[in-house]
Amino acid sequence: MTSVKSSNLGYPRIGEKREWKKALEQFWVGKLGKEVFLKRIKEIYLGHLQKQKDEGIDLIPVGDFSLYDHVLDTAVMFGLVPERFEYDGGKVPLETYFDIARGTKGAVAAEMTKWFNTNYHYIVPELDGVVPTLVENRPLHFYKEAKQKLNIEGKPVILGPVTFVKLSKGYNKSDFKKVVEQFVPLYASILRELQNEGVEWVQVDEPILSTTLSKEEVAIFNDVYQALHEAAPNIKVILQTYFDSIEHYEDVIKLPVQGIGLDLVHDHGQNLTALKTHGFPEDKVLAAGIIDGRNIWRANLGEKLGTLTEISEIVSKDRLIVQPSSSLLHVPVTVKTEEKLDETLKRALSFANEKLQEVGTLTKGLQDGHKAIQEEIKSSTVAIQKLNQSPLRNNTQVQGAIQNLSEYKAKRDSPYEIRKGSQEKEFQLPLLPTTTIGSFPQTSEVRKTRLTWRRGELTDEQYQEYIKVEIKKWIAIQEEIGLDVFVHGEFERTDMVEYFGEKLAGFQFTKFGWVQSYGSRCVKPPIIFGDVSYKEPMTVEETVYAQSLTDKPVKGMLTGPITIVNWSFARDDLSLSDIANQIALALRKEVEALERNGIRMVQVDEPALREGLPLKREQWSSYLDAAVYAFKLTTSSVQDDTQIHTHMCYSDFEDIIEAIKALDADVISIETSRSHGELIQAFEKNTYDNSIGLGVYDIHSPRVPQLEELTRNIDRALQVLDPKLFWINPDCGLKTRGIEETIASLKVMVEAAKLARENLLVNKG
Ligand code: GLN
Ligand code: ZN
């Protein structure tokens, strides 16, 4: 019998209307009691399972659901509670779980970082000082629950031991293997208990296999999975990879597991090539990730079925599972609720629920042949064709420009040494100039006013007037604080990408297209669906108004092209660099408009440059080249004495320092406060010849920094950086901070700058 199976790897937690988020946040502020909260959460979760069952998915994931993060879930399952939190062993209480994630008065929250190359953040497990023990078999619990409540024979999802340890901190990297080995017996117990319960399939996620690994690291997999197989020989383990191709294909397919899950969408074609070149073992199942789990476009079902059919010549149908390329955590829940979207776009979209339908359709098609799903294939082809024919995807002017990019200058007229001279004359700034990163506190009043305006209860003029009042207030505050370079404060922006997306052609916005970013925090990425082009000035009015109120220079403030792409759902019919360059050409017009209107400093933020780095090192340079080019295309048409700033907010940037230099911004500001020492070290090893501002205090906490602390940070930086090139600024935008603490902190910063200047003069004299 040939029976193709359908499967899913994970379902969005947040709910159609973010019910999950709301329940969590109400619980945290005490508006929901624990019992009611847990009950509500359970309803939401069981609803998700039921949905997948209704869609006819054969292997429904259980245990992928979370109250915060699946990496944290895994850590607490092993009793890994950092020492600064109270814990006496046993199952980790819910309160402790949230404390680790969110911090308490006495203990800082665990660090959070990006989940591979996505915009999802996980909680970094801390392995130091605690011995892992299995305090609760979480997958078993979820398996039983699905079976009892919904009669679902679930597929437990577990984050695999090698990836788990790799993502953790608090151990010596040279002990990696030993640390992994500590976890093997615990995973063995989990699997053994699952086996005893009658579980057939388990999905063990090892996305680390899609990154660059050494032969030795791959060898660890063999030992680990051999041990797990011996512990639970009857259970079928699907070793699941995603987000890219697996590098050591031939080794991986030999691992002692019963199935391998491959990403056939984000693999640059390499998984399929490997399959064709090296074949696939006859005793294993192939879980084919054919539907894009990370982007929102409807699949071309005809093409997809073609690929699956090709694969079925290598792997027989009874050993094939059809599934999304990754968990659907990274896409919104359903297109259905989008009532106001442009019809052409809407028909070409597919969110989690629609993707499950696509998986079902392809499963049927592979099983029963092309004819069986003819209608669906046709409808997907038509939808995609219509989208491709839509005028917004056929802007000949934009496309022409992209074809003739060499006509656009992507290099400043003069080298930095010369520009620096002209800029010094232009701005007459003191040594160690002080500035901020762009945004000032977005108080609830600012947000409320924007909402009222969006609802139509304020006219455009009234809203703009309100924004101007805020700008004026903050120009006065900046005068009083004594900063050297001002900003207008970004009060008109909810979000640094959305704001520009709404003003450029080629973007669309959903109503409920949220995805989880971290914890209960969700983002609603804009959709880049057409050719991007400039319509009208986007920031000139606010910036020029701010500049009219002061003699100090006001920086124009734009979001850079790579950040806009990385924080959006981008069209998948164009390359990343084409999309980024379209945006760059549009932003370039804004830079020019600012310059023409007397704004002589322009900051182009690229906080998402690093997170877009491909998982494989060999692809880094082509990505970074594209990012650098798009930035330079945005910023290079200005005069020598117009000063280009950029800002990035992460500290471990050694990997990309060459790219940062290549941006050739006149001034860069970088977040550093949380690991000041490390960043300074990076500058001991590398040189940076343009001006640089290292964040001298951490804006992520409401605390007002002490003068001594800032002085220390500045002194340390000046040991490795040239004082003539050094700027003093907080480490990121201040939009999440309160007004009073912001003013107080900036005053301390200005004071510290003054002291540092005096010291420099004394030492010189
Ligand atoms: N200019 C932005 C701000 O200050 C930069 C934000 C960021 O780096 N993420 O808010
Ligand atoms: Zn930042």
Image (cartoon, grey):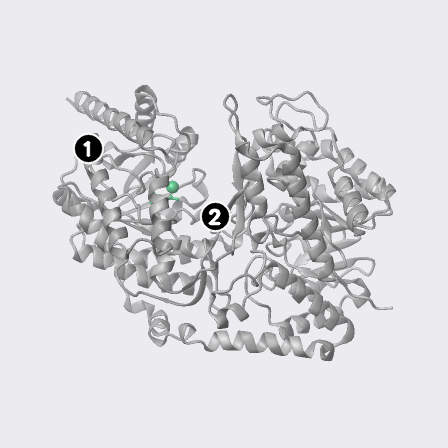
Identify the residue position indicated by label 1 in the image.
431
Q: Residue at x 37, y 74 (%)?
A: 395
Going by the image, does 752 lie left or right of 552?
right
Quarter of the picture holding the C terminus: top left
Closest to the observer: 340 or 676?
A: 340
Q: Amino acid at mark 2?
A: Glu
**Image x and y of residue 684, in percent:** 37, 33
Closest to the observer: 698 or 702?
A: 702
Q: Quadrant of ligand 2?
A: top left
**Image x and y of residue 593, in percent:** 21, 59
**Image x and y of residue 527, in percent:** 46, 61
Task: Name which of mark 2 and mark 1 comes first in the sequence.
Answer: 1
- The kind of secondary structure element at disc 1 is loop
Residue 309 higher or lower than 514, as above or below: below
Residue 165 visible from this viewpoint: no
Identify the residue position indicated by label 2 in the image.
611
Q: Amino acid at mark 1?
A: Leu
| Residue 164 lies in quadrant | top right
Q: Residue at x 74, y 64 (%)?
A: 279
